Image (cartoon, rainbow, N blue to C red):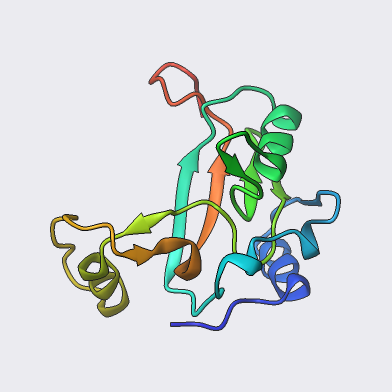
């Protein structure tokens, strides 16, 4: 369990790992904190965007869409490895999950079957989206 990083500490941590970090628009204050608490953090969720093109993907993740407002994650990972930061705080990336699974993640034990949607994952996980169609053909 960890306290969420400040915007400055997140940028520093990523850059200290040798990553190219792009700070997109007002990412430092762009969040969904009005929907509930952010933290403590227990892990990182990684998805693919199901889109092509870095700028298009970054804008989608920053703005969201008609059924899910942005930000949709904390960062977008481009094909060249650059990380575009689009949100800081609570984002719409994890949705509901199973409390038993969260307990297993926190305890670093085997994951049980996910059979309930009773826990707010947006509160507990950082979210990153990799620019990829996810079709098995789009190369990473």
The relative height of residue 115 versus residue 99 in the rendered view (above or below) is above
Q: Residue at x 49, y 69 (%)?
A: 123
Q: Nearer the viewer, residue 139 or 130?
A: 130
Q: Where's residue 29, x and y in %?
A: 79, 64
Q: Where's residue 26, x and y in %?
A: 84, 56
The relative height of residue 63 versus residue 14 in the rendered view (above or below) is above
Q: Nearer the viewer, residue 42 or 61?
A: 61
Q: Residue at x 69, y 61 (%)?
A: 31
Image quadrant assignment for residue 51: top right
**Quadrant where the N terminus lies?**
bottom left
Left or right of residue 17, residue 21 in this image: right
The relative height of residue 89 versus residue 6 in the rendered view (above or below) is above
Q: Where's residue 50, x and y in %?
A: 51, 27
Image quadrant assignment for residue 17: bottom right
Left or right of residue 107, residue 44 in this image: right
Left or right of residue 114, residue 34 in this image: right
Left or right of residue 133, residue 21 in this image: right
The furthest residue to the top: 137
Q: Residue at x 78, y 73 (%)?
A: 8
Q: Residue at x 72, y 28 (%)?
A: 56
Instruction: Count every numbered label the image shows and give the total.
Output: 0
Q: Where's residue 89, x and y in %?
A: 65, 67
């Amino acid at each position: 369990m960890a306290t969420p990083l400040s915007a400055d500490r997140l940028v520093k941590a990523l850059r200290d790992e040798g990553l190219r970090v792009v700070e997109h628009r007002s990412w430092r204050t762009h969040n969904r904190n009005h929907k509930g608490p952010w933290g403590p953090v227990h892990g990182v969720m990684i998805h693919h965007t199901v889109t092509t093109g870095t700028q298009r993907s970054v804008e989608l993740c920053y703005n969201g869409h008609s059924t899910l407002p942005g930000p949709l994650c904390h960062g977008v990972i481009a094909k060249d490895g650059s990380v575009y930061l689009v949100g800081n705080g609570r984002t719409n990336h994890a949705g509901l999950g199973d409390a038993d699974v969260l307990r297993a993640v926190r305890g670093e034990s085997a994951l049980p079957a996910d059979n309930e949607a009773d826990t707010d994952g947006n509160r507990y996980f950082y979210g990153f989206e990799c620019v990829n169609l996810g079709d098995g053909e789009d190369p990473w």
